[in-house]
Image (cartoon, grey):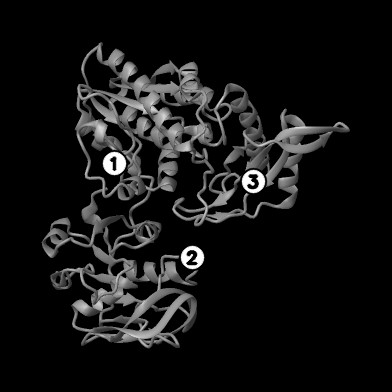
Amino acid sequence: MAASHGVLVVDFGAQYAQLIARRVREAKVYSEIVPSSITAAEVSAKNPEAIILSGGPSSVYADHAPKVDPAIFSLGIPVFGICYGFQTMAAALKGVVAQTGKSEFGRTPLSVKSSSKVFAGLPDSQSVWMSHGDAVSQAPAGFTVSAATSDTPIAAFEDSSGKLAGVQFHPEVLHTEHGQAILQNWLINIAGCKPSWTTANIAEDEVAKAKAVIGSKRVICGLSGGVDSAVAAAIVQRAVGKQLTCVFVDHGLLRSGESEQVQRDFVAATGIELVVVDAVDQFLSALAGVTDPEEKRKIIGREFIRSFEKAARDIAAGGEVEFLVQGTLYPDVVESGGGTGTANIKSHHNVGGLPDDLKFTLVEPLRTLFKDEVRHVGLELGLPEEIVWRQPFPGPGLGIRIIGEVTKVRLDILREADVIAREELKAAGLDRVIWQCPVVLLADVRSVGVQGDGRTYGHPIVLRPVSSEDAMTADWSRIPYEVLEKISTRITNEVREVNRVVLDVTSKPPGTIEWE
């Protein structure tokens, strides 16, 4: 869907800019994140229905602090400021922002004025999530203060129409009691955004776009086994049919059954032409003796490129291939610095290192989407649920879930333990509740145990169930004890050389989701 029919989220370095964009989409309105350097002319060219100014870590009055172009407020486009966005909006409209000496962090009681349009239909007292040191001490002329806290007299303001408004707190986080209702009310009822953006029509739009871009040219796609590349390939295949050839590098580092699923279920559902590269021995040889996780990542990336390069050359021998499909998601684009794109694969954030004579124009049909949206598109395209709902899996696969050297024996041990954990989480109805559950083999650790009346020195297995929306932050999942008991009992009974199962109860931050 064209960005001109949605909301621009202006990013001032916010921790939650992506989350704001997500909440807008949950209100069925398209959203796009843009940098704070955007000018009024650039905004006007995009012709958005509304603008949201995000939070950020700076002080409005500090040197080099990002500022919003004041001319944006003269375009007649509704604008909503959040936290720093609220403050920079106040400053741009000749209000006053100051250090009050009173910071607010975390859950905070908010008092709402009944005359407010932004808070219409919501309780006069509600709990919100604050994170600020500075505060607006004087609202701009013509604006009414619509909410306050005990330490922040101006916690929200709005003009007479409500179309220019802002809040000091974070409505986009779940901790704000009525946050989504506030955003939705402003977007739909005040700003007049049309709630017409759904995942049901995304597939259709993206198929049409891919057809227009690719035309009659040939295209290839590297399948990883994950949902992103599978959905991207399915879109392009729907657009150009036999012009697409997919390459699946079987490196031997996937979870149990995943290689077979790609080769059997995905092909059956799509009719896609698939080239399979058997590179298991190649990867194991390259990883032999390596224990450093970063070195493992580099080796796996290098060997993948080599395998993909050979397959690409073989395919291109039958006629020039001009396009490469990638399953790049919106968070990928943002987290890699904005993702302005490149015509040459070797400088792209997901894949790198192909020789200069292998040049492809990138096709990225998912680059405006979040993971949950991608899943819904996959279902629209008729992909098997086992692939669509597969939990996120790191690119280096099981190679970084083995702490120590990667060997065939260790991979087999980890696969056995992993499939048991997945089976029991699914049986308990938890596989879609949690974000993912990495299963880690502490291969270089020997744990004393007693099995069959004898002393054993087996390996510990770590379970790392986490809950998250976007994986940038995560919390450890509170799995019921009876489910953990089943997983632990089965693993220690069924998996050779494992005599201990432990649970990781660390949030992100400080701990990452993967162990490495």
Q: Residue at x 60, y 46 (%)?
A: 464
Amino acid type, residue under disc 1 in the picture? Asp
Decide if residue 256 is on the left or right side of residue 123.
Answer: right
Q: Earlier in the sequence, mark 3 or mark 1?
A: 1
Q: Residue at x 54, y 43 (%)?
A: 515
Label 1 to label 2, Cα distance in Å?
A: 31 Å
Residue 427 is marked as none
Q: Residue at x 53, y 22 (%)?
A: 260
- The residue most toward the top is 318
For discs 3 and 1, the disc positioned in front in the rendered view:
3
Quadrant in the picture for residue 239: top left
Residue 174 is marked as 2
Residue 205 is marked as 1
Residue 429 is marked as 3
Percent across and percent down for residue 96 are 24, 85
Percent across and percent down for residue 188 are 33, 66
Asked if residue 224 is positioned above or below residue 112 in the image, the reply reads: above
Amino acid type, residue under disc 2 in the picture? Leu
Label 3 residue SS: loop
Decide if residue 249 is on the left or right side of residue 217.
Answer: right
Asked if residue 49 is positioned above or below residue 394 in the image, the reply reads: below
Q: CB under 8 Å between callouts 3 and 1?
A: no
Label 3 to label 2, Cα distance in Å?
A: 23 Å
